[in-house]
């Protein structure tokens, strides 16, 4: 699915590259941030469904399209903190591991300037159905 929202010169798009959602699958998620002017102290709050564990489970500093950011891994999602985001487009990618079946609410992802909260964008939420993996069992 691809959901996008724009406000005040910021665009945020979340793409989930998955045709079907099955227990045990790895799901690739891409966030595309487009900023139309230089900004400082920007945070992306990216939620996960309750059945998804982050493939990378440690927080740390990384570089995204030549710009440094700190990734904080939380139970319900990841937060990406940027000291500065020059005008341009940035792509953040993460993988989820689906660990149980059921229906789950994927909340919004929000991109916001910390000291000028009017500069923000967010995606819509959506419902995700994770299908139980069929286990082959052999009884002897």
Image (tube, helix red, strand yellow):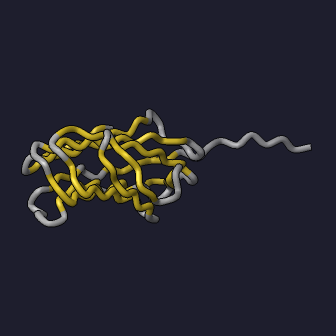
**Residue 117 vs residue 20, the one in the foreground:** 117
Q: Is residue 82 left or right of residue 88?
A: right
The answer to which quarter of the image holds residue 90 is top left
Image: 14 above or below 100: above
Q: Residue at x 18, y 39 (%)?
A: 88
Q: Position of residue 87 (x, y in %)?
A: 15, 42
Q: Is residue 121 left or right of residue 100?
A: left
Q: Residue at x 39, y 42 (%)?
A: 93
Q: Position of residue 45 (x, y in %)?
A: 30, 58
**Residue 59 vs residue 66, the one in the foreground:** 66
**Residue 139 vs residue 80, the one in the foreground:** 80
Hey, which residue is sitting farthest top in the picture? Answer: 19
Q: Position of residue 16 (x, y in %)?
A: 38, 40
Q: Position of residue 89 (x, y in %)?
A: 22, 38
Task: Name the quadrant of the C terminus.
Answer: top right
Q: Residue at x 19, y 41 (%)?
A: 34
Q: Residue at x 56, y 54 (%)?
A: 100
């Amino acid at each position: 699915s691809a959901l996008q929202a724009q406000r005040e010169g910021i665009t945020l798009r979340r793409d989930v590259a998955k045709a079907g959602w099955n227990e045990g699958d790895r799901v690739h998620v891409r966030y595309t941030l487009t900023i139309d002017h230089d900004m400082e102290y920007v945070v992306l709050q990216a939620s996960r469904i309750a059945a998804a564990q982050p493939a990378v489970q440690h927080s740390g500093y990384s570089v995204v399209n030549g710009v440094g950011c700190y990734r904080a891994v939380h139970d319900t999602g990841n937060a990406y903190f940027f000291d500065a985001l020059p005008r341009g487009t940035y792509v953040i990618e993460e993988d989820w591991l689906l660990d149980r079946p059921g229906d789950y609410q994927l909340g919004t992802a929000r991109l916001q300037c910390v000291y000028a909260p009017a500069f923000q964008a967010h995606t819509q939420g959506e419902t995700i159905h994770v299908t139980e993996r069929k286990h082959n069992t052999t009884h002897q």
